[in-house]
Image (cartoon, rainbow, N blue to C red):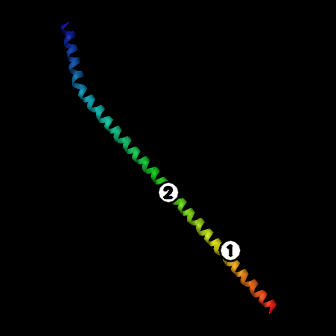
């Protein structure tokens, strides 16, 4: 019986001495996990931000290209109309003079 209680005491002392180390290891692992999750969240947020900026930049460039094309087309129509008017005016003047 004394052997059994001595063995039990030895096991209890061993577990008691290992418990703080196990707690410290779990605490360190939890801290590392929290740090990794925060880092991953920040990187994901930055990736979405960069993607949004790229899309916005492309949309802005496309809008400028469309506006430039519309401006050029408007000038072309205006110039053609003006030239046509002056050609017609000079033709009428030539025929009636």
Quadrant housing residue 87: bottom right
Depth order, front residue of 29/6: 29
Task: Say which element carries label 1.
Answer: helix
Pick the quarter of the image with the C terminus: bottom right
Residue lying farthest to the front in this orientation: 96
Direction bottom: furthest residue: 97
Relative to residue 14, is residue 37 drawn left or right?
Answer: right
Rendering coords of residue 26 (x, y %): 30, 31
Q: Nearer the viewer, residue 54 or 22?
A: 54
Quarter of the image with the N terminus in it: top left
Residue hosting label 1 = 77
Q: Secondary structure at mark 2?
A: helix
Find the residue positioned furthest to the right: 95
Tell which circle, 1 or 2, labels the residue nearer the N-terminal end: 2
- Indicate whether 12 appears above or below 85: above
Nearest to viewer (mark 1 / mark 2): 1
Residue contact between numbered discs 1 and 2, judged by CB atoms under 8 Å: no
Circle on res. 54: 2
Residue at the spot x=59%, y=69% of the render? 68
- The location of residue 47, given as percent across then percent down, is 45, 50
Query: How far from the left and from the top, in percent, is residue 42?
Result: 39, 47
Q: Which mark is residue 13?
A: none
- Report how far apart the C-alphas of labels 1 and 2 lie in the structure: 35 Å
* In front of the other: 63 or 38: 63
**Would residue 92 appear left or right of 67 to someone viewing this image?**
right
């Amino acid at each position: 019986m004394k052997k059994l209680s001595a063995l039990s005491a030895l096991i209890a002392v061993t577990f008691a001495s290992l418990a703080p180390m196990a707690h410290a290891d779990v605490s360190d692992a939890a801290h590392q996990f929290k740090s990794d999750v925060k880092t991953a969240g920040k990187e994901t947020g930055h990736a979405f931000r960069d993607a949004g900026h790229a899309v916005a930049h492309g949309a802005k460039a496309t809008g400028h290209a469309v506006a430039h094309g519309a401006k050029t087309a408007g000038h072309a129509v205006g110039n053609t109309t003006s030239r046509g008017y002056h050609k017609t005016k000079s033709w009428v003047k030539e025929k009636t003079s």
